[in-house]
Image: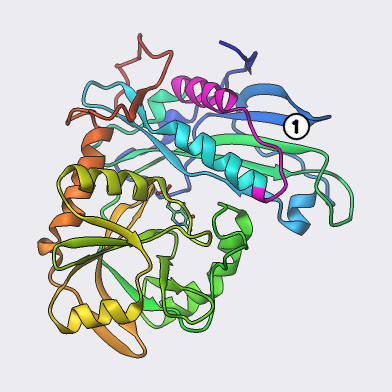
Amino acid sequence: MKYNITVSKTKNSRLTEVDFDKIPFGRTFSDHMFVADYIDGEWTNLQIVPFSRFLMHPSGLALHYGQAVFEGMKASKGHDNRPYFLRPELHAQRINASAERMCMPTIPEDLFLQALHMLIALDQDWIPKKVGSALYIRPFMFANGEFIGVAPSDTYKFIIFTGPVGPYYPKPIRLVVEEKYVRAVNGGVGEAKAAGNYAASLLPAKLAKEKGYDQVIWMDPHEFKYIQEAGTMNLFFVIDGKVITPATDGAILKGITRRSIITILKDKGYTVEERLISIDEVVEAHKKGLLQEVFGTGTAAVVANVSDLTYQGVQYDLPAVEEHKVAALAREEINGLRSKTIPDERGWVVPVEGTVVASTSSSH
Ligand SMILES: *Cc1c(COP(=O)(O)O)cnc(C)c1O
């Protein structure tokens, strides 16, 4: 292996404390994490250490000026009980695209991947086995330069930590078109998985929740006419048998699930259009009885069916979720690839290296 990553293992594994039948999302953390420092123009102190808190200087730049980017990905166990990633290299590439936008250093793709393989191989017993559950992986980078001043930091930390997540059976979600706040503008940072984007989304999301909706649909910031995405998911519309998803135009997050589902649906013979789609077109299609499905896509939920969407105070109900065939097909294909129950003809599924003698004796 190319990089010298030191490993110090925990003496107090918390694995036995976890109830794998009841995992609260995002609140359980595995035994180890990968940590690296960017100092004097290079990544150094490459190490896997027991998961723990760390000290931050009060002037640590990310805390003030928001130089922070992240990824969200998963490892899952195949039916052969071995751990797999889905298209991990795309996450390595995307965190670098995000970093460049935020004036942060990039991480060599092979370093990102080596750290990922070593960490997940070490904590592979934390990967839940139930279909649909997974080990959620959170790589992130932030500025930890210690000075006051709006300038790029001179030092950064890159960390990967993980935690098991239970099977995600999302209820159909209710969406409302956001007509006041915007998420992203062309030329802004909407394409970057940057921490601040999520802070900006909290207030509109909270206001929508108070009215009974699960997420807002973000619109273009100029006319509030064209659809961007929903919450932290990309959106797909099925109209008269055709699949339409907003083109990633500089303000929409380039979802990896989105990208995979476009390929899957095209391979299955669907027409998939990546283009501008206006809310008027969606409403028109609904009036004609041609709006068959709306669904959101992302790593966490994979595919979330939409039950209804509201625009200008009018609620438009979608057909019953059981009839959402395209969403179901996309979900089954992604979950099937992750669990190795369908053939991986595209070479997307990557076995976690260093696991040939995987421990198969753990009890969950
Ligand atoms: C992460 C994210 C998505 C989904 O991307 P995936 O790569 O599919 O997980 C969509 N929209 C936003 C705003 C996101 O942050």
- The residue range painted magenta reads 101-122
Does the rendering let one see residue 360? yes
**Main secondary structure along the magenta-highlighted residues:** helix
Q: Position of residue 233 (x, y in %)?
A: 40, 58
The residue at the point 34 percent across, 90 percent down is: 313
Q: Which of 262 and 166 is in front in this view?
A: 262
Asked where in the image residue 323 lies, by quadrant, the reply is bottom left
Which residue sits furthest bottom?
A: 313
Asked where in the image residue 337 lies, by quadrant, the reply is top left
Q: Quadrant of the C terminus?
A: top left
Q: How would you rate the neighbour count of disc 1 (Cα within 10 Å): few for under 14, some for 14-19, many for 20 or more?
A: many
Q: Position of residue 215 (x, y in %)?
A: 40, 70
Q: Nearer the viewer, residue 149 or 261?
A: 261
Q: Name the residue under label 1.
A: 38
Is 46 above or below relative to 107? above
Q: Quadrant of the N terminus?
A: top right
Q: Identity of the amino acid at label 1?
A: Tyr
The residue at the point 14 percent across, 74 percent down is: 290
Q: In this view, does 170 lie to the left or right of 91?
A: left
The residue at the point 59 percent across, 32 percent down is: 51
Is 251 above or below relative to 219? above
Q: Where is residue 9 in the image (x, y as percent from the top left)?
A: 58, 18
